[in-house]
Image: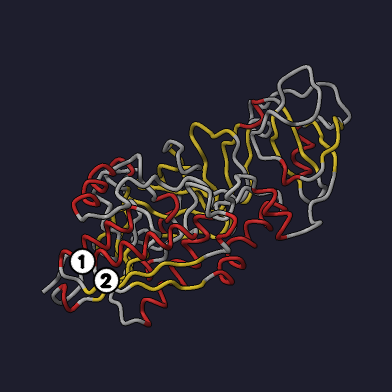
Amino acid sequence: MVNSLHLPGRPSETRVVVAMSGGVDSSVVAGLLKREGYDVVGITLQLYDHGEAVAKKGACCAGQDIKDARRVSAALDIPHYVLDYEREFEKAVMGAFADSYLSGETPVPCVACNQTVKFRDLLETARGLGADALATGHYIKSFPGEKAWELHRAADKERDQSYFLFNTTPEQLAFLRFPLGGMPKDETRALAREFGLDVAEKSDSQDICFVPSGRYTQVIERLRPGAAEAGNIVHVDGRVLGRHTGIINYTIGQRRGLGIAAAEPLYVVKLDAARHEVVVGPRDALLARSVELRDINWLGDEPFETAVAGGLEVLARIRSTGPLQSATVVSENGSVYVELVDGEEGVSPGQACVFYAATGGGERLLGGGWIKSAAGAFTAKDAIPAQAAPLPAEAFLAQSR
């Protein structure tokens, strides 16, 4: 006998740990599994000192969220535990977030949190409790394929969270379950009302949970005091246009607040941590066509090197809310590149490039990697000619990569 979670045995004989954030999604997951008769255990992670965020709406894993998860568990009559993972979270997520920014990158902490604290540490805790599966409120589909468990985009494309789960390993997938993958958000809220849960109308979290003020530079300065160094703001043609107080105050693609005067609109096109330089240029310089990746996670049926031999056609996504676009994944001399057909503006090292199957409308998640570098308009054949300057734009970017 195989139950609805594709596990052997009756639901009553199957223990499922539910990661409960205190929001409506994970609460409904617990309610659905409880209604089906599973042995449900709720766990909420305290990930940071929530004192600063208690009064901030839209910040997950804060004090109020823990209280909400506890009330939901009581209403559903399931055991509930709060685990202190502050130390693990600060080291694996917050510390890595700060170091990434100081290196001139744009990190995606939600991916790191899933990769480490939730799907590594919490998963092992669930196993220790004798669980057969760990269920979460993520909007993504998972089911056993011909060779292994597969991940597919959620039915509700506005809520799809596959981008944030690209780094999930095949071993983790075999233990994880995502009951909301085929459900629209309005149905989730309707179920919460049906279950009598007072979080039914609770708004979704929007902020990075450990940046309740929305000012990530404050977090970086607290975690790495004195690490940010001043430097020059440099045009892609080599001219020094001004000074800055730290590259953490800038992001790729930024136009406003540069602190310099210029006759033309300028954008941040590169953050050079080694030289402490903020490189600016015209908008055309933001377009990247070739992206080099590191730390690939692969979820396809055949080995990665076999799949990309000769180039693999995929649909790629650079940002969680960005469009899917046609691309080719290639491997050359130990390096992995994604060649974007249309290109993408404002690509930054530290972001994730996630790829989906080119067939079937791009529903299946094949994996992805972290962006190591990007090459764009100033290195393409149709490069914009640089104005007369001490150092041509192409040479400047080449030397600063």
The residue singled out by tag 2 in the image is: 78
Q: Nearer the viewer, residue 171 or 180?
A: 180
Q: How many marks?
A: 2
**Mark 2 belongs to which amino acid?**
Ile
Along the line of sight, the residue nearer the viewer: 104 or 239: 104
Asked whether residue 305 appears in the rendered view, the answer is no
Residue 392 lies in quadrant: top right
Q: Quadrant of the N terminus?
A: bottom left
Local packing at callout 1 (Cα closer than 10 Å; few below 14, some 14-19, many 20+) is some
Nearer the camera: disc 1 or disc 2 = 2
Q: Is residue 277 left or right of residue 121?
A: right
| Disc 1 + disc 2, Cβ < 8 Å | yes
The residue pinned by badge 1 equals 34
**Dot 1 amino acid type:** Lys
- C-alpha separation, residue under disc 1 versus residue under disc 2: 8 Å
Query: Is any part of residue 344 visible from this angle?
Result: yes
Which residue is located at x 45 percent, y 66 percent? 118
The relative height of residue 9 versus residue 242 in the rendered view (above or below) is: below
